[in-house]
Amino acid sequence: MNGIYLDHAATTPIHPEVVATMATFLATDFGNPSSIHSAGRQARHRLDDSRRQIAKTIGANEKELIFTSGGTEADNLAIIGTALQQQTFGKHIITTQIEHAAILDACKYLESIGFEVTYLPVNKDGIVSVDALVDALRPDTILVSVMMINNEVGSIQPIQAIGERLLSHPCCFHTDAVQAYGITDIDVNALQVDLLSITAHKINGPKGIGLLYKREQVKIKQRQFGGSQERLKRPGTENMPGIIGFEKAAVMVYGKENERSSYYHQLKALMISLLDEAAIDFTVNGAVTLTTPLILNISFKGTKVEQLLMNLDLAGVYVSSGSACTAGSIEASHVLTAMFGEKHERTTSAVRFSFGYDIDEAAIKETVRRVTEVVKRLRTLNE
Amino acid sequence: MNENSKTRVVVGMSGGVDSSVTALLLKQQGYEVIGIFMKNWDDTNDEGFCTATEDYDDVVRVCNQLDIPYFAVNFEKQYWDKVFTYFLDEYKLGRTPNPDVMCNKEIKFKAFLDHALSLGADYVATGHYAQTRTVNGEVQLLRGVDDNKDQTYFLNQLSSDVLKKVMFPLGHLPKKEVRQIALDNNLVTATKKDSTGICFIGERDFKTFLSEFLPAQPGRIQTMTGEDKGEHDGLMYYTIGQRQGLGIGGPGGPWFVVGKNLATNVLYVEAGYHNPYLKSDALLATEMNFIQPIDAQTFECTAKFRYRQKDSPVIVEQLENKQIMVRFVNEERAITPGQAVVLYQGDVCLGGGTIDQVFKDNQTLNYLG
């Protein structure tokens, strides 16, 4: 039985054209962009080209990109780097309860060294209130971080509206755009953000490469030491094959966001209507119109998420729940808990399906067939 | 492809050598094997270290070596409700519980079995040193061949219906050979130290652990004739027949625990390993589970009163309410309320119950007053 991969919000298969570009680069170029000889200059040339191309995809200027090892590092650098730099102006940070652990754990660390963090709640659709955020602002607020699209339920946050309201406050504004990149048009100026994180492996690029956009006049402290790369903000010899692959993947999705988005809309709508036809009791978490088409988060009443995920795996449907804890066992999703409260049935029976360009309607039909079979069997067992 | 390839077996894997070899043997026999780690207890410390995380990591590495899928399930809540609560309740009553028996009954061969069946498993397998045999459609529980490792004592609460769904692939092997198989196959857990003691306590001090959950009430130590022998730390810390940790000096010893009185909070001690107060000739057990029903109301068999003890000949009388009276052919020493009494006929484990009262010459011993 062929496995169906529907976990593209976790990571995506690398695109063959990205592989080809990286393979050619790996076989021919090896120079260090910092070297002052021909091989170095050649690498530097490629680096500058990539930087320019990627900057264009988010409406930034190329001097504003800091390449990192991925989304987590970009988020950490944004949160901790800003806090340490701005602490003379205040020690208050505002974020939401539904952020990725890369943000939440960085905030917890900051709390442990004397910062104060406000974690804003979300409504039943998983969306933060702009007014509540503005109300939480204080004179000593130095940073606001709100994700653009939630990674578990896909809820779209009002980033532009927040950006506009924050214009009258001196704090920095960061957004984790990891799940939005490639699906939504991103323009850092339209969004009025100072800092923005993205990563390559969610858009069929390689793992191990991401970036933090940092508006030129915004100051942050470096977290790593040992060289002048990335304008001192992230020293270390550049991950050139990763950057080349990132560029290729970025260029391939750039300008196609709407096309990609509407394709996933089709898949998502199809999946919901087929599940409706199958008449298995289910609830979609997050309103369809207010979530990314890439993610479909569903609670299957009367099932337990651990049981569901293992059975789906054995049936060849590869999906995930919100968060996996270290021993592999699953804890209730902090996102669904923020939406529905502690111990709500929806938090213990929810599965995330996330689509990719290589998924077609036939795969969705087969998925629904397998899901229906598993859910029906488990319900009978659990009765 | 052989016939076994259509049979799905879920192996309970702890990250130890026994369950690793269990999975290996089943895989070699051609079964469709799935490894599952049970997380029953959280001991995460201040630095974020949790033994379960380390053990699961070993499960992951072994399963990858064997090329079988693996998962982890969380039974912390069930374990707390069914095993740990029982464990504390028994200590509150001054008894010495056996959480492993309860864990097998409620977790490994109930919650875990149910979970495995929900994954479409035909069988679950564990690394217990025990065997099964089907006779006239009924499954019997047999001792493992390694006398020193036989674990049927802990499996006494299983039913024949449960055993129908269970495989013990190590039952016919000596422990030494199991380790050798692990070494021969380069399993990453081949040289891992066996776990000892009660799983949730681990290497920690038992007294400290218990005092985190139950308030200790110090009281007096007395001989049976009322002579004061000092102070005890709390009745729950002592078990019948215990010598260590009494702190009684002076002449006349060594001293042994021979009884407890919960009402007066007195711990009774007497001198000498073979003190008559430690000797008994019968016990009453509750929660008796017969793996297969036995028709005779009274029958002869052998019994174990604690793990790794030699069998003793006994005469069993079946009473009402899952109770049995067990009369010993020879006097026994330090039979402990709360522990299991497990019955055998030859190599067949008949089942077991919980020791509730202990008698000598038809008099109840004040092991628990």
Image (cartoon, rainbow, N blue to C red):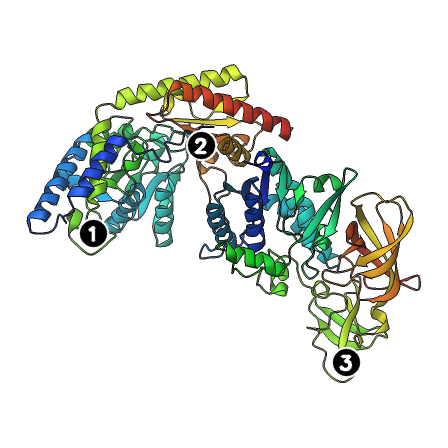
Badge 3 and badge 2 in a common chain: no
Viewer-closest of B64 and A191: B64
Q: Which chain carries label 1?
A: A
Residue at left offset 77%, top offset 63%: B310
Residue carrying label 3: B253
Residue carrying label 2: A318
User: Reading the chain from its start, which is encountered first: label 2 or label 1?
Assistant: 1
Q: Percent from the top left, x then y, of residue B103?
A: 66, 49
Q: Toward which corner of the image does residue B7 lie, by quadrant?
A: top right
Viewer-closest of B217 and B347: B347
Asked if one can make out residue B44 in the rendered structure from this viewpoint, the answer is yes
Q: Percent from the top left, x then y, of residue B128?
A: 65, 52
In the picture as drawn, the residue positioned furthest to the front comes out as B2
Q: In this view, does A235 lie above or below A271?
A: below
Residue carrying label 1: A236
Q: Percent from the top left, x then y, of residue B226?
A: 84, 74
Viewer-closest of A236 and B312: B312
